[in-house]
Amino acid sequence: MGRATARTLGCAALLVIAITGCAAPGGTTSAGPPATASRTPTPVAPTDLPASVAASPGATLAVLPDDRAGTALDRPFTYRGVVLINKDHPVSKGYAPKVGESYQLVPEADRAFGRMLAAAKKDGVAIIWRVGYRSYAIQQQLAENPPTQYGADAEFYVAQPGRSEHQAGLAVDVASKAGFGTRFPETKEFAWLRAHAHEYGFILRYPEGKTAITGLNYEPWHYRYIGPAAAAAFGPSSTLTLEEYLGGR
Ligand SMILES: [Zn+2]
């Protein structure tokens, strides 16, 4: 199956294979300019948030104010050179970045992912690419028909349209022949990524135990490109979230 076919099938195909993969929402990258040149968001410390928000599972912490509206939503929210897409920082239907043929990521991320796969292969590690870019329409279909295995937790695995990092061409879902979805952490491919992904500009976007911050459950298969400079602040085996990094927490 070619990558284009895989993309067309999207999550439906992935869900058959893996519990989670496709449903994951996506984040951001260093591609793309700020929505408005003059905005200077002020990070909000967790202690400044209402207790109900800070303690509510699944509620994305509003670490960065976002006053975009109308056509400003045609570009992703960007702060400190990094794109951020989550429940609090959506994009409109009008946002559709050009992505590469190889891994359906924006060109810089596409090349970086290719280098990462090649390096892993040299180490005897076979990371399987599953999905990169996902359109607003596909994300909408997924949100309206979430995989039944998610049950009541579907909203913590499937981002609403406009709220997925996959729509930015900056997020990629991976797997291993030895395990995928929730079993992926048991594989050497996962271990390799945890040790080296940051060297290629990728981070584990939804670490375990950070649902209250990211709005999404642990997704060991979902990696986000933020560029090597920003990813260096994360380092190996990091459980830092992009929200925490950008919010300065
Ligand atoms: Zn994903």
Image: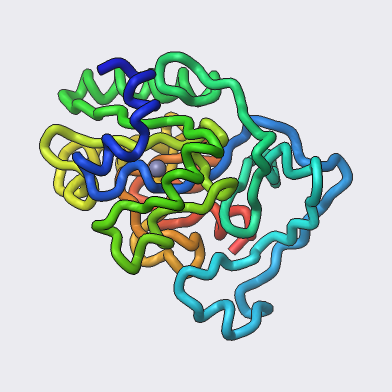
Looking at this view, name the residue that lies furthest to the right: 38
- Residue at 58%, 58% (x, y): give it: 87
- Residue at 21%, 41% (x, y): give it: 16
Q: Residue 74 versus residue 241: which sits nearer the camera?
A: 74
Q: Quadrant of residue 37?
A: top right
In the figure, is residue 18 to the left or right of 50?
left
* Residue 27 in picture, x, y percent from top left: 53, 44
User: In the rendered image, is residue 76 in sight?
Assistant: yes
In the figure, is residue 147 to the left or right of 33?
left
* Residue 218 in picture, x, y percent from top left: 34, 57
Does 236 appear above or below 109? Answer: below
User: In the rendered image, is residue 226 in sight?
Assistant: no
Does 159 appear above or below 104? Answer: below
Colour mapping used in the image: rainbow
* Residue 8 in picture, x, y percent from top left: 39, 26
Looking at this view, name the residue that lies furthest to the left: 178
Q: Residue 28 versus residue 139: which sits nearer the camera?
A: 139
* Quadrant of the image where one finds ligand 1: top left
- Quarter of the picture containing the C terminus is bottom right
- Residue at 47%, 69% (x, y): give it: 58
Looking at this view, name the residue that lies furthest to the bottom: 51
* Residue 242 in picture, x, y percent from top left: 53, 52
Q: Residue 249 versus residue 226: which sits nearer the camera?
A: 226
Tag count = 0
Does 16 appear above or below 182? Answer: above
In the figure, is residue 123 to the left or right of 138?
left
- Residue at 36%, 34% (x, y): give it: 10
- Quarter of the picture containing the N terminus is top left
